[in-house]
Image (spheres, grey):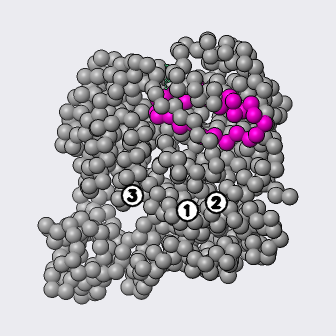
């Protein structure tokens, strides 16, 4: 069979079911996914001069082994390997922790290049790895990995895929653009980013790669839009009286902002045209109830509604709330997550009820996207914290109905110009006030050495029968470390509060049943302090929790910190946010200061943009924008705009389908936008 980039990664020799699964979890299904799973940074393996390196810098040093290595054991299963290395005229100490197996490679008089972290004061290198001599690539890509699949394995598989598939990597972007913008070919881009010779060639490949990525993204948006114009939208003829009744029966009065956006959205749904709308509102501004109201509107018009959320915890929480709200009035609510769909009997029943239309409202995770899930008449899709879903995923869900209306909700405001370039021509509704009676969350920045007093503070609040969250530091590169960290903090916290308070632990690796149990226990106040990884970041709503402590807070971007802080201050009690950190750079300090100065999500988003414009990379993730692998919509805004104009031209061309030079682009669109037919 001919090789194609759409082949599953399973075709590679040595990639068995376990590895396939691990790769899938990283979002890598096909060879193409693999080849575009670019390194998020590079380690610089070019040997450096001691006089040129700064304290704590990660560097490669080349030298001659000057003493026999000494291996010493300490603690349980811990060891340390020490030896001296002569680097030009300096003798430095090299130490490897828990890599005792390296001893055999270190021979007196042998020349070695070692990569590690430099300690200037001690003139020593904390070794991370010994670089192979034949290592000609002086930049080593660092890839996303997980507990199931190591960095080095990912790297090896990518190398293997590249060498086997390099001949079938063809240009997707029409030739005229490649010439016009002097871009590298797709093959050169992939080679240059994965295996660069030096910083300069990596940068060059990236530049073309960013254009390619933005262009393909915009082409998909454009393609979908053209498609929508052909299909007419739905007219959702809701029953106004029922809706009024429903709103009147809510336990609180809507804020003026909520009323305004409900009106805007209802008006839009009622029109024949297709609704494509963004609802933005700060954390805690009450977007969920707005979603409930408009979903109810669609249901009174005889349609089904779906609410799609990024995490199981959030899906469960929403399902419980919505069921309470809706069951008394005869609206059927169901929950669909990957753990419900694994229970065969339950799944069968659920699917058949969705197809029959006896379920009116379904809440779910990306499990909603599975091909076997069919609706009787899906009229409205709401996505919560939408930036977590790719365009393709939203498109799939949309195709499950006859072009249902779409509302995307986000707590991370996006400047309008950017929203237009990243999402296409979208309408925006904004909630710009919080419900009455909310107190400003008091935020304090403390150094690590003040941690004890932070714990004392938490204890005082617990004594007042409040609850607290402790968020463990974010370690992007390794899920395993993430987990280990959370567990350590859990142990420490348990020790600290002894038998007086109950401490719970919540992390992403737990089964969803377990997660649900822990969340329910926290809600019911059977747990006083919840130690958690960032799984709690979005949407979790426990009003009695009044303290949010974030450890190593400088590892989080502003948007994420604001989201985390938004988990408290949800009731009428005074709430607090404690940021514990010793920032390592000016951006970290700036982020801490901004957080202590304002509670306003719109202000924070603006500051976030400014910092990112200056080069703060931490903010780039979780930014409320679609996630790109290479490009950054802020720093590369110009490229994004050009890519958009070009995509509009090319896709909008009446003869788009006939032109030979669009052949590969059309193939690409068809394989990435399943089911979108253009005829
Ligand atoms: P978010 O916009 O962050 O998703 P939620 O929808 O979770 O916010 O709402 C936060 C809390 O505020 C919830 O407990 C919700 O019940 C409550 N709430 C929403 N609207 C109002 C209102 N108009 N008055 C009082 N409380 C409200
Ligand atoms: Mg929410």
Q: Sequence order check: which comes first, mark 3 or mark 2?
A: 2
Foreground of the two, 668 or 490: 668
On the image, the x and y values in percent for residue 224 come to: 73, 53
Q: Are marks 1 and 2 in contact (CB under 8 Å)?
A: yes
Q: Is residue 62 magenta?
A: no
In the image, is 450 to the left or to the right of 254?
left
Q: Which residues are magenta?
A: 265-291
Q: Quadrant of the N terminus?
A: bottom right
On the image, the x and y values in percent for residue 192 come to: 51, 78
Q: Which residue is mark 1?
A: 640
Task: Tell me which corner region of the image, top left, top right, bottom left or bottom right, holds residue 212.
Answer: bottom right
Q: Which residue is mark 2?
A: 218
Residue drawn 24% across the image and 85% down it: 64
Neighbor class of circle 2 (other Cα within 10 Å; few <14, some 14-19, many 20+) is: many
Q: Report the disc number at residue 613.
A: 3
The correct choice, above or below, for 329 with respect to 586 in the image is above
In the image, is 57 to the left or to the right of 274?
left
Task: Tell me which corner region of the image, top left, top right, bottom left or bottom right, holds residue 448.
Answer: top left
Q: Quadrant of the C terminus?
A: bottom right
Whether the residue under disc 1 has CB within 8 Å of ligand 2: no
């Amino acid at each position: 069979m001919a090789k194609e980039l759409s082949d599953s990664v399973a075709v590679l020799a040595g990639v068995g079911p376990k590895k396939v699964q691990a790769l899938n979890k990283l979002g890598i299904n096909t060879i193409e996914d693999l080849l575009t799973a670019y390194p998020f940074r590079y380690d610089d393996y070019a040997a450096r001069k001691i006089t040129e390196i700064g304290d704590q810098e990660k560097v490669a040093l080349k030298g001659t082994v000057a003493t026999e290595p000494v291996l010493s054991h300490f603690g349980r299963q811990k060891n340390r390997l020490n030896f001296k290395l002569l680097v030009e005229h300096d003798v430095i100490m090299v130490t490897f922790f828990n890599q005792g197996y390296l001893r055999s490679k270190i021979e007196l008089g042998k020349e070695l290049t070692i990569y590690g972290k430099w300690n200037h004061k001690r003139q020593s290198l904390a070794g991370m790895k010994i670089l192979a001599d034949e290592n000609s690539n002086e930049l080593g890509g660092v890839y996303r990995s997980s507990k199931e699949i190591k960095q080095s394995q990912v790297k090896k598989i990518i190398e293997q895929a590249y060498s086997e598939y390099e001949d079938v990597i063809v240009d997707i972007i029409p030739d005229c653009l490649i010439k016009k913008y002097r871009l590298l070919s797709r093959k050169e881009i992939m080679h240059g980013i994965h295996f660069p010779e030096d910083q300069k060639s990596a940068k060059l490949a990236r530049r073309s790669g960013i254009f390619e990525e933005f262009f393909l993204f915009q082409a998909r948006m454009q393609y979908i839009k053209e498609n929508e114009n052909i299909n007419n939208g739905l007219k959702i003829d809701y029953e106004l009286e029922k809706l009024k009744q429903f709103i009147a029966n809510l336990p609180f009065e809507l804020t003026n902002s909520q009323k305004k956006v409900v009106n805007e959205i209802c008006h839009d749904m009622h029109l024949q045209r297709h609704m494509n709308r963004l609802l933005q509102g700060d954390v805690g501004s009450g977007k969920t109830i707005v979603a409930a109201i408009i979903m109810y509107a669609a249901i009174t018009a005889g349609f089904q509604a779906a609410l799609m959320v990024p995490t199981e915890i959030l899906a469960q929480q929403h399902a419980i709330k919505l069921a309470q709200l809706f069951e008394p009035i005869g609206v059927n609510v169901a929950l669909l997550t990957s753990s419900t769909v694994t229970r065969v009997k339950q799944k069968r029943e659920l699917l058949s009820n969705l197809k029959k239309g006896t379920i009116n409202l379904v809440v779910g995770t990306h499990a909603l996207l599975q091909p076997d899930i069919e609706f009787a008449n899906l009229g409205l899709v709401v996505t919560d914290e939408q930036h977590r879903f790719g365009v393709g995923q939203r498109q799939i869900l949309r195709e499950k109905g006859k072009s249902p209306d779409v509302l995307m909700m986000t707590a991370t405001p996006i400047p309008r110009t950017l929203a237009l370039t990243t999402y296409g021509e979208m309408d925006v509704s904004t909630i710009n006030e919080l419900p009455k009676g909310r107190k400003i969350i008091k935020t304090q920045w403390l150094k690590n050495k003040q941690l004890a007093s932070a714990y004392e503070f938490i204890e005082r609040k617990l004594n007042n029968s409040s609850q607290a969250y402790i968020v463990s530091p974010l370690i992007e590169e390794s899920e395993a470390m993430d987990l280990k960290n959370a567990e350590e903090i859990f142990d420490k916290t348990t020790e600290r509060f002894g038998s007086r308070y109950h401490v719970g632990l919540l992390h992403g690796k737990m089964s969803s049943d377990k997660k649900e149990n822990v969340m329910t226990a926290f809600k019911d106040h059977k747990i006083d302090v919840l130690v958690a990884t960032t799984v709690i970041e979005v949407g979790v709503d426990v009003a009695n929790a009044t303290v949010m402590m974030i450890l190593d807070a400088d590892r989080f971007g502003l948007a994420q910190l604001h989201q985390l802080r938004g988990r408290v201050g949800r009731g009428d009690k005074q709430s607090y946010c404690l940021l514990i950190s010793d920032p390592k750079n000016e951006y970290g300090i700036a982020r801490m200061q901004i957080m202590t100065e304002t509670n306003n999500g719109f202000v924070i988003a603006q500051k976030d943009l400014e910092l990112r414009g200056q080069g703060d990379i931490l903010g780039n993730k979780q930014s409320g924008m679609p996630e790109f692998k290479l490009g950054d919509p802020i720093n590369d805004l110009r490229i994004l705009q050009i890519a958009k104009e070009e995509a509009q031209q090319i896709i909008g061309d009446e003869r788009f389908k006939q032109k030979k030079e669009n052949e590969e682009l059309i193939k690409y669109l068809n394989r990435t936008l399943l089911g979108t037919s253009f005829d």
